[in-house]
Amino acid sequence: MRIPSILISVALLLVVGSVSAYAHAMLDHAEPQVDSTVNAAPREVSLTFTENLEPAFSTMEVTGPSGQRVDDEMFARVRKHFSEDETVELVAIAGYENMRSKMNVALGIEAQGFCVLK
């Protein structure tokens, strides 16, 4: 008698407790708009998704008028002055600083006066 009640409970959970689930986040809003053309490089690109993204599996590509990735030219200039190992280290440091500064803004941490910019 116990097995039928378990089966009925499972069936009820499947029917009553079912909710919509999506396997991937979808782009909800973009500024500039998707596939738009701008006359000058925007100061910021903003993307809003339907749910949080997993950074390890997320990428974004910004292209110029010719379809070339915007960052290729910059990396070519960097590679003229730095080895591959130095470039990786430079990118890692820049990424860390970017993350740190965004965390400071999000947490409301103000400059402590260690570096005064004029």
Image: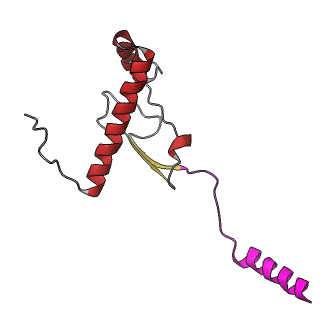
Identity of the residue drawn at 74% across and 78% down: 13
| Nearer to me, 89 or 47 | 89
Q: Residue 71: image x %, image y %?
A: 40, 23
Residue at image coords 92%, 90% = 1
* Residue 102 drawn above or below residue 68: below
Q: Residue at x 36, y 19 (%)?
A: 74
Q: Position of residue 47 (x, y in %)?
A: 43, 45
Q: Which residue lies at the image location 56% right of the left edge and 41% below the top edge?
A: 57
Query: Which quarter of the rendered picture does the C terminus lie within?
Result: top left
Tell whether position 101 is magenta: no
Segment tinted magenta in the rendering: 1-26
Q: Nearer the viewer, residue 64 or 4?
A: 4
Is 86 in front, or is 35? 86
Q: Does the magenta portion include 22?
A: yes
Farthest-out residue, bottom: 1
Q: Quadrant of residue 46?
A: top left
Q: Residue furthest right?
A: 1
18 left or right, relative to 8: left
